[in-house]
């Protein structure tokens, strides 16, 4: 088969079971299997209870009691998954990535070219984490993510340090060949319209301008949007569901964006956001 179905998913925040149900619905609606899933971060594979200690943010968001559900849902996961990091992750597992910990089901990269299971020359780049102007370099003595992680575990660095991408990763991204078909990043390369305060120009915008990808997919702001930067089409993805509706099983419009990869033509074609609202509008409100 020369055409392959790709699904890029937005923030899932450990709701792996709901994500599984969503992907199964997509396959049913499309009448064909999903060949590859990509995540723009905040997937939240807290498989072990101790992983929650590395979740940044208020302690009320650490829920080790959810790990048994996550493990069970991960057993049901049956799609090739390639991912970058968001800013709320089990960074103890990602910044020193061991594929066997995830049962060989997850392909992950901090920054660079993502591996995937699709045939042909589909180039997918990604950079995980978010921007902080004072955190573009590793802590003194770190030099690498595993070393930075060891400092955090020893109490010599803050776990929040694990969430910010580094200058050397930006340099790596800029050194890659231009015009990939798809670029994944966690934060938007452009200010969301709803932001009513000064929002500094971000390195994500520089990467889009330098690399000129066909498509960018991002998340982080928990809302779906489509816009254009130069020749690049940007698709911002929503959160899988809202906290008040976790028990309803409803998924926010625009949590995923579907693409078709035509191997013979070497072309990536957008199918569209999923799920769609009946009125065709994009919103973070579940349907």
Image (spheres, rainbow, N blue to C red):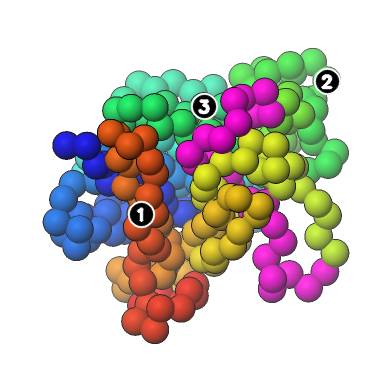
The residue that mark 2 highlights is 140
The tag on residue 113 is: 3
Residue 228's place in the image compared with 42, above or below, is below
Q: Quadrant of the N terminus?
A: top left
The residue that mark 1 highlights is 258
Q: Residue at x 74, y 18 (%)?
A: 142
Q: Could you tell which of marks 2 and 3 lies nearer the N-terminus?
A: 3
Residue in front for this viewpoint, 258 or 252:
258
Residue in front for this viewpoint, 277 or 21:
277
Question: Any magenta on residue 180?
Answer: yes
Question: Any magenta on residue 231?
Answer: no
Tell me the distance, in whole angstroms, between the alpha carbons under discs 2 and 3: 27 Å
- Left or right, 174 with respect to 254, comes to right
Q: Could you tell which of marks 2 and 1 lies nearer the N-terminus?
A: 2
In this view of the protein, can residue 141 be seen by the observer?
yes
Total numbered labels placed on residues in the image? 3
């Amino acid at each position: 088969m020369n055409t392959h179905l790709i699904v890029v998913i937005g923030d899932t925040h450990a709701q792996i079971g709901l994500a599984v149900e969503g992907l199964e619905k997509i396959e049913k609606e499309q009448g064909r299997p999903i060949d590859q899933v990509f995540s723009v971060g905040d997937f939240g594979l807290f498989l072990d209870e101790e992983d929650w200690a590395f979740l940044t943010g208020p302690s009320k968001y650490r829920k080790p009691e959810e790990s048994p559900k996550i493990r069970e849902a991960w057993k049901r996961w049956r799609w090739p998954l390639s991912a970058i990091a968001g800013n709320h992750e089990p960074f103890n597992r990602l910044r020193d990535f061991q594929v066997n910990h995830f049962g060989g089901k997850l392909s992950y990269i901090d920054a660079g070219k993502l591996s995937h299971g699709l045939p042909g020359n589909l180039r997918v780049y990604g950079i995980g984490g978010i921007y902080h102007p004072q955190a573009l370099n590793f802590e003194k003595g770190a030099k690498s993510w595993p070393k930075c992680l060891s400092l955090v575990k020893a109490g010599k660095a803050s776990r929040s340090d694990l969430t910010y991408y580094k200058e050397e990763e930006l340099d790596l991204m800029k050194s890659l060949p231009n015009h990939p078909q798809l670029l994944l990043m966690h934060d938007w390369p452009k200010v969301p319209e709803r932001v009513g305060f000064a929002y500094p120009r971000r390195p994500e915008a520089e990467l889009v301008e330098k690399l000129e990808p066909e498509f960018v997919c991002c998340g982080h702001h928990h809302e779906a949007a489509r816009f254009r930067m130069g020749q690049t089409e940007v698709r911002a993805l929503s959160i899988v569901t809202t906290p008040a509706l976790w028990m309803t099983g409803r998924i926010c419009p625009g949590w995923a964006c579907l693409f078709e990869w035509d191997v013979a033509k070497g072309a990536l074609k957008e199918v569209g956001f999923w799920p769609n609202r009946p009125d065709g509008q994009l919103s973070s409100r579940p349907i």
